[in-house]
Image (tube, grey):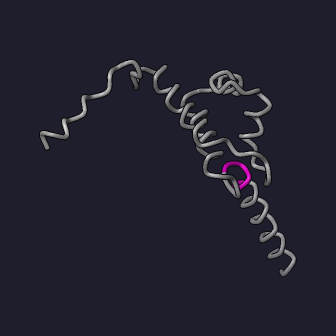
Amino acid sequence: MFACFRLIVYIWKLTTQASNDAWGGNVDDRTKRLRQLMLDRGLTISAVASLTGRSEATVRIWRCKTEGTRVIPANTLALIDLATEQKQGKLDLLQPAPAMPDREAA
């Protein structure tokens, strides 16, 4: 009976660890955001590398879960987000910014 219980606990720990490793666990929030952006926008590692001007090996490191690896810089993550939104037509970076109100009128 006790051996059966230990086996169930062991299997539960294995499945819990596998689900944590698959997507989360100890992964940095920016790494999760990069993975989600790539999934949502259909980006490949080579596409992210060309958007950011970095090597494919660097992008692979950014996507890695391993403790102590480099995390994608926040400004690079924002660049990927903006660039893919512009390519999808959700954002027009060439449109002029709205006029600022005069300080004297206020």
Q: Position of residue 103 (x, y in %)?
A: 19, 40
Horizontal arrangement in the rendering, residue 90 relative to residue 21 (left or right): left
Say which of 96 and 59 sits in front. Answer: 96
Q: Position of residue 54 (x, y in %)?
A: 72, 27
- Near-viewer residue (2 or 65): 65
Residue 52 included in the magenta stretch of the image: no
In the rendered view, would you say 87 is above or below 4?
above
Give me the residue at 76% from left, 27% from top. 56
The residue at the point 78 percent across, 71 percent down is 9
Determine the residue located farthest toward the front in the rendered image: 104
Examine the residues drawn in magenta and state their main secondary structure.
helix
Name the residue furthest bottom.
Answer: 2
Image coordinates of residue 82 in percent, x first then y, are: 49, 30
The residue furthest left is 105
Q: Position of 102 compared to 4: left or right?
A: left
On screen, 84 above or below 14? Answer: above
Magenta span covers which residues?
19-23
Residue at point 54%, 36% (across, down): 78
- Horizontal and vertical percent position of residue 91: 40, 25
The image shows a total of numbered marks equal to 0
Is the residue 11 above or below the residue 96 in the image?
below
Name the residue at the right extreme. Answer: 3
**Viewport quadrant of the C terminus:** top left
Q: Quadrant of residue 19?
A: bottom right
Picture quarter with the N terminus: bottom right
**Does 102 sit left or right of 43 as displayed?**
left
Q: Nearer the viewer, residue 78 or 32?
A: 78
